Amino acid sequence: MWPLGALSEPQLRVFVVPHSHMDVGWLHTVQESMQVYVTNVYNSVVEELTLEKKRRFIVVEQEYFRLWWDGVTSDTQKGQVHQLVAEGRLEFVLGGQVMHDEAVTHFDDQILQLTEGHGFLYETFGVRPQFSWQVDPFGASSTTPTLFALAGFNAHVISRIDYNLKEAMQDTRELQFVWRGSRSLSAQQEIFTHVLDQFSYCSEGFNWDGEAIFPGTSPNDMYLQMQIPVTKDNIQIFTSLLVRSVLTRATWFRTPHVLWPWGCDRQFFNASLQFANMDIIMDYINSEASELSLSVEYATLGDYFRAVHSDQVSWQVRDHRDFLPYSSDMHHAWTGFYASRSGLKGLARRASSLLYAGESMFTRYVLSAPHRFLDPAWGLQQLQQLRWAVSEVQHHDAITGTHVPRVGDMFVEHLSTGMEGVHKLMASIIQDRSPAHSGPEPGGHFAVVYNPLAWTVTTIITLTVGFPNVSITDESGHPVLAQVQPSKEMPSAYDLYVLTTIPGLSYRHYSIRPRRSSQEKTGEPEPFVAKTMQFGGRLRRSARQVGGSLVPVNNDCYIVFLDLDTNLMHSVWERQSNRKVYMTQQFMEYHTNSDVRKGPVSDNYVFTPSGAAEPAWEAVRMEIVEGPLVTEIRQYFHRKVNDSEPTFTIYSRLARSPQGSDGELLCHRIEQEYRVGPLELNREAILRTSTKLNTGRVLHSDNNGYQVQRRPYRDYKSNTIARNYYPMVQSAFIQSRHSRLVLLSEQAHGVSSQGNGQVEVMLHRRLWNNDEWALHDGLTLNDSSVVHPVLWLLLGSRALTSGLRQRSRLALQHRPVVMLRQLSEIVPRGSGSRWQEAVTLPSRVHLQILSIPGWKYSSNHTEHLRTLQKDRKHEPKADLRRVLLRLQHLYEVDQDPVLSRPVTVNLRSVLGGLGSVVSVEERSLTGTWDVNEMRRWTWSTRDPHHHRGPGSLVLIWPRVPSQTPALPLRPV
Ligand SMILES: [Zn+2]
């Protein structure tokens, strides 16, 4: 520790860390970026580092690095990179495919994208990244430090946090602290965290290569941004600029080490110019080191943190609170992107869920039995393609919706291609297991339904059929409880609801046949045809007395009352606690300014409403479609009284399952699907749910589907509405003393509680303004699409809902996958049950992943390094017998007296059907460390209750099968 104001006493050590911030898609596609600058960055940096021993560089985004490594490098370059990495001069930091967004990404996907990059780095170089570099994401979540600790990182770097807070942390020299990101893991998985100071990751005035020239940009741009070369005449100017910046920064930190990131967006594509000029400045400063009382050196991030770590400082501890939302100044609250490009946010999550299902399906298929037609190597390739695409879209300009439309098309294309491949893989597995058997039966379908969760699930699946008279039977030939009704959006089609109960990681088979005539008596029960009740339009402005005439819609858990005077929801009675909660819902819009000369505007990033939200409709129509399985309430909101098409629709569904079936989760949810759009320009659409719960405007919302954060409403000098917006990745709730209303979502949205008892979800945004920078780059949000988000509403006591919330969110995230085939190929009866044994985990434990990663390296580190040294060119084959298993305890340590207790899991049951286990290893989060060999740095803190213990997120890495030990699992 060095005292303030004593700068001349100990010498300052300045760590100049060369880096290039390379967005994996923002204003340009990945391919354009590769062509225009990324390739040059790696080519020229490797050359410059090889020329001069003292130079350093940090490499961040693995998607780019891998494209370069696999597609561009020569053998000589590969050798040079191996050498530089071995000498610690070229350092991989973060090591994920991308620098993931922290607000709107799901933690499963964060882990995926890290695992992807880390697997490649370990396989290729035998190295494991130890430092993060999250310098551009728009706000910092507390999930990230926890995951990075579990992955074996020693320090974490963030930058974009609230401007007020950063200023205060600079003043009190608290930009560095030890972060205990998880309430449950606490000190066990704490990590040293460094917040970049107000200069962030760019070093203005020290970039000599100018702007990368993409087609269509003027060459003037390049030279305008280009620094003049350093000469004898101007060296003083550069030197004093650098020294001044160093001295300013040094006062904000507690050790005499200054992290001086050198670079910016798309820098170092001409590394020769960069280093040649900087060498001169640094040599000059070092020649005056004693007068200036500081020295400068090229450094990696590791060099800097090793120096900080060696200082005997006792650090401040931060608890599990996050740094969201992010405001960069008074007028810019970065809370708009929580809902920008809502369609892409939905697609990204659907792709992730499909991948999850495909992984376990493939693993159990490959390891369980001989495969007749399917080539496992091809199967793995399909999964790898989707892993890559899902990883890519986690980038902080991808799923955030902060890219230009052309780049959005690229993300969509990559996801769609990947999904198509995995669909093909799944179809091939089904085909392989149940080949065509008998003759054609025109018009019929054969449905295979796969439950990707490791519990038995009772739910309703929806099939769309072209005929109302159907007969549906299961794999034993028994008729199945079903309901048919006119499709909500396709006039000539019908929705067929089928009640299904599927054991964990198992399949059900259904045959759906048209009945030849409705009179034909087969003796079998037929699907019930639901009846529709229509309710005339109600005008918003002439809504009369409210609550005078109510229609109830009920199941065993809830009665939803609809008000016929308004056609809006009136209240919900929750049977278990016997409480009625007044609750109504409507669509509203925030209006935003479109002229930058008249004040701040909303854009892809920021949310700047002109005032409070206003109702976005004049009339609402209602239909109730009632059946024995599902009752659906359809509310159509018309923007104008005479609009023929509604702009907003809510389809609410209440399900009934027969007595005795395991339908607890199914009963305890009101499913709502919305149809929103197209919006008018400069509107930000929300669904506001207003209740009479006394919530004190306190909202709870999740970080990345992982932990819950408490969000009390705060008043600010400016931008109060926007600064009270938070991301909802998977769940949010409001509560009174007795009742809690939980919202579960299928994709990320913005969420806020602007009034007592209220919760609102931002569903869609459409914006256009005259900001020249945005127009020049085409970075606008004129999103005229129609989106179909889904929310599940859970209402009940705190105890009931905290028991249901976790499993329900997973039930929504990983709904059964339905694969339809023409009924020309029929499976033999009873074949389904013989397919594979079911897996049932304790209800507090979630199967986070079961996959075959396809790693090619030995799990013994020493052996792996030996192989790497011996023969770098040897390309080993993917190990298809090695399985990655992650289990998650679903409850926080103090959440519930019973549910939070440790659980013992019998691995034999999880790995059932995979053959015999040869060995089981507990590995770090991304699989690259044997946890027994992983030694993370410890930091002394000002917390007296400091303790350490073993990690608890268990990652097991079995080779195929012999004895399976039982592993204790602690809450995470
Ligand atoms: Zn960026």
Image (cartoon, rainbow, N blue to C red):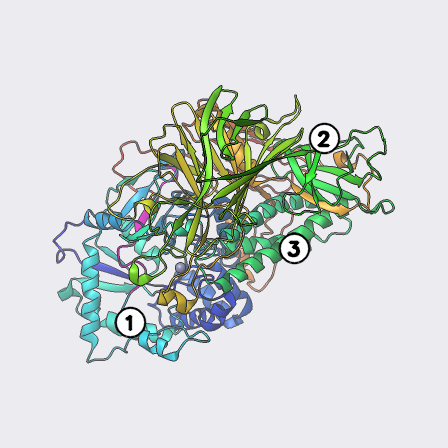
User: What's the distance in space between the residues labelled 2 and 3, CA to CA?
Assistant: 33 Å
Looking at the image, which is closer to me, 474 or 137?
474
Q: Amino acid at mark 3?
A: Gly
Q: Position of residue 156 (x, y in %)?
A: 36, 49
Residue wearing tag 2: 481
Q: Residues within 10 Å of mark 1 (few under 14, many from 20)?
A: many
537 left or right of 222 in image: right
Question: What segment carries the magenta color?
Answer: 188-203
Looking at the figure, which quarter contains the C terminus?
top left
Q: Residue at x 37, y 44 (%)?
A: 725
Q: Nearer the viewer, mark 3 or mark 1?
A: 3
Dot 3 lies on which element? helix
Residue beneath disc 3: 421
Mark-to-mark CA distance, 1 and 2: 74 Å
Q: Is disc 2 placed on a helix, strand or loop?
A: loop
Amino acid residing under circle 2: Leu
User: How far apart are the alpha carbons under marks 3 and 1?
Assistant: 48 Å
Asked if the residue at tag 1 contacts the one at tag 3, i.e. Cβ–Cβ closer than 8 Å, the answer is no
305 versus 65 height, above or below = above
Lateral position of residue 370 relative to residue 533, left or right: right
Residue 304 lies in magenta, yes or no? no
Can residue 151 be seen by looking at this rendering? no
* The stretch drawn in magenta includes residue 202: yes
